[in-house]
Image (spheres, grey):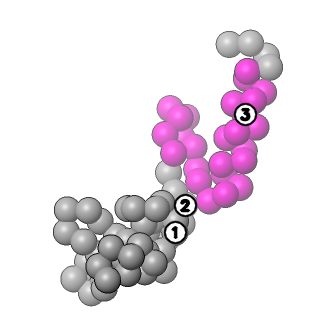
Amino acid sequence: MSIILKEKVTNLKELCEKVCFKITKDDKIISSSPYETCAFCGKETNVRKDSYIGNRKTYIDGAGQLCTICYSRIYK
């Protein structure tokens, strides 16, 4: 890998970690946020990952957690 490419990869990893993601040594991305992301648009929701699925109002079996905007667009 060239020096320029290594610098760009390093800068990208640093940027991702500033935006609430952690990059592992084998380049897997892990979200460090305690909140779920919307399965449709990818934005962070106000639902905690450790909350019981049965209590989630915008959770869809087979799809996952949706944000309130996507849920209302799909089901209204």
The residue located at (48%, 60%) in the rendering is 42
Question: Which quadrant of the view contains residue 57?
Answer: bottom left
Residue 25 seen by the camera: yes
Question: Does 25 appear in magenta?
Answer: yes
Question: Which quadrant of the view contains residue 60?
Answer: bottom left
Residues at circles 3 and 1 in contact by the CB criterion of under 8 Å: no
Disc 2 residue type (three-letter): Ser
Disc 1 residue type (three-letter): Glu
Assign a secondary structure to mark 1: strand
Assign a secondary structure to mark 3: helix
Locate the C terminus and report the quarter of the image it occupies. Answer: bottom left
Camera-side mark, 1 or 2: 1
Query: What residue is pinned by disc 3?
Result: 10
Q: Left of 62 or right of it: where is 56? A: right
- Residue 67 location in percent, x, y? 43, 75
Q: Left of 24 or right of it: where is 16? A: right
- Residue 56 location in percent, x, y? 30, 83
Q: Which residues are magenta?
A: 5-29
Query: What residue is pinned by disc 1?
Result: 44
- Is residue 14 depicted above or below 64 in this figure? above
Query: What residue is pinned by disc 2?
Result: 32
Query: Which numbered disc flags the more N-terminal residue, 3 or 1?
Result: 3
Query: Which numbered disc flags the more N-terminal residue, 1 or 2?
Result: 2
Disc 3 residue type (three-letter): Thr
